[in-house]
Image (cartoon, rainbow, N blue to C red):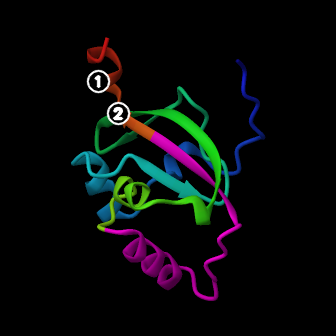
């Protein structure tokens, strides 16, 4: 099965930028990143402080379908904490349950070879 994706709206190196989120990825507490635009395709890699990560899956999802587990995979303690911080970071944004975002799933590159 082949999935076609639109052109990327931003470079993969901009997928995870905030220092606290970079630390969460490196510590294994963050394995998802939601963005309005498409930053990576499955199989692409990116590097954070010398550690390589692989994008394993990319999907479209309405904000309203986000679960507590997704918020934890985003590196937050709960969905309400994620929502509150996103609204604080993006002045004027409202939480529109039907708003579609791109969900980028990733893992350390080493686990791709050691999982076999």
What is the total number of numbered labels drawn onto the structure image?
2
**Residue 84 in magenta stretch:** yes
Q: Residue at x 56, y 80 (%)?
A: 90
Please tell me the numbered disc located at residue 110: 1
User: Where residue 59 sits in the image (x, y, percent)?
Assistant: 62, 43
- Residue 62, image x and y in percent? 65, 60
- Dividing the picture into quadrants, the one containing residue 77 is bottom left
Report the residue at 70% width, 51% height from top.
9
Q: Quadrant of the N terminus?
A: top right
Residue 30 versus residue 50: which sits nearer the camera? 30
Q: Secondary structure at mark 2?
A: strand
Mark toward the start of the polypeptide (1 vs 2) = 2
For the C terminus, which image quadrant?
top left
Q: Is residue 51 left or right of residue 66?
A: left
**Can you identify the residue that label 2 sits on?**
52
Gap in Å between the C-alphas at discs 1 and 2? 8 Å
Q: Are marks 1 and 2 in contact (CB under 8 Å)?
A: yes
């Amino acid at each position: 099965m082949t999935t076609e994706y639109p052109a990327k709206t931003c470079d993969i190196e901009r997928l995870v930028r905030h220092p606290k989120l970079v630390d969460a990825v490196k510590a294994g507490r963050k394995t998802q990143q939601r963005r309005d635009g498409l930053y990576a395709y499955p199989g692409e890699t990116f590097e954070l402080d010398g550690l390589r990560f692989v994008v394993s899956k990319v999907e479209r999802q309405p904000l309203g379908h986000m679960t507590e587990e997704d918020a934890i995979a985003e590196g937050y303690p709960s969905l309400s904490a994620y929502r509150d911080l996103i609204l604080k970071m993006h002045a004027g944004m409202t939480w529109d349950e039907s708003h579609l975002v791109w969900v980028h799933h990733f893992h350390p590159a080493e686990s791709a070879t050691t999982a076999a």
